[in-house]
Amino acid sequence: KNEVEQSPQNLTAQEGEFITINCSYSVGISALHWLQQHPGGGIVSLFMLSSGKKKHGRLIATINIQEKHSSLHITASHPRDSAVYICAVGGHFGNEKLTFGTGTRLTIIP
Amino acid sequence: ETGVTQTPRHLVMGMTNKKSLKCEQHLGHNAMYWYKQSAKKPLELMFVYSLEERVENNSVPSRFSPECPNSSHLFLHLHTLQPEDSALYLCASSQVWGPDTQYFGPGTRLTVL
């Protein structure tokens, strides 16, 4: 079983701050996903990556396969970024099902 | 608009009731998923259908019964549930079963009395 750990569990920051959320996993994977869940439950997929770095607007995701670690960065954070950010990994031991972290609750204060 | 819809959005049922959750995707995807999200626990995969065939059953109790009549629709039939089954049930779809982006529905908030 792949263990997925996220840190921090909770993060509160001022508007405009640079945000970093971390994800570590224990065994090899084929892909890592970052998801965003807003109050009310809706989940949006932000990134899927297997190597290197991806950028979309103010969001940047990086992954280090050797260290089994990924980071999600948010630049110029805004209150609308407040949400739970979830890391998920799949493809370990040839099993494509996703294993999810417990999430990081981010609150951006105006 | 995610292209994945779920009904109902909220459901309250007694332990002896039978109900069904419905999911529909308008994205032309070939894989569909049921997830359970309980309070303070990670998302848990329940079932996966790929090309209308079940490819994953993640040790889910038999009181949950999935059905995939076609590639656009997925049902979760519920019977004789327990209060601990109260959770948010999320449906998702992806183009293929495997390392692919999943698109989630808004979820059904289920309360079992």
Image: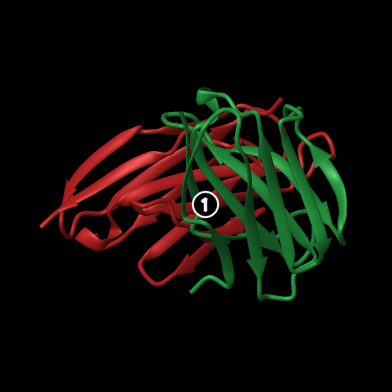
Chain colours: A red, B green
Quadrant (top left/top right/bottom left/bottom right) for the C terminus of chain A: bottom left
B80 or A11: nearer the viewer: B80
As drawn, the residue found furthest toward the front would be B16
Name which residue lies at 44% across and 39% down. Answer: A22
Name which residue lies at 82% across and 41% down. Answer: B56
Q: Residue B33 placed where, x, y %? A: 70, 51
Q: Residue B57 placed where, x, y %? A: 80, 37
Q: Residue B59 placed where, x, y %? A: 76, 27
Mark 1: few/some/many CA within 10 Å (<14, 14-19, 20+): many
B18 or B54: nearer the viewer: B18
- Image side of residue A69 versus residue A72, left or right: right
Asked where in the image residue A79 lies, by quadrant, the reply is: bottom left
Quadrant (top left/top right/bottom left/bottom right) for the N terminus of chain A: top right
- Image side of residue B68 versus residue A33, left or right: right
| Chain under disc 1 | A
The amino acid type of the residue labelled 1 equals Trp
Asked where in the image residue B32 lies, by quadrant, the reply is: bottom right
- Dot 1 falls on a residue whose secondary structure is strand
Q: Is residue B54 above or below residue A103?
A: below
Q: Is residue B55 above or below residue B7?
A: above
Q: Residue B77 placed where, x, y %? A: 70, 44
Name which residue lies at 47% across and 55% down. Answer: B9
Q: Which residue is disc 1 drawn over?
A: A34
Looking at the rendered structure, the number of numbered marks drawn on it comes to 1
Q: Is residue B24 above or below residue A25?
A: below
A108 or B76: nearer the viewer: B76
As drawn, the residue found furthest toward the left would be A110
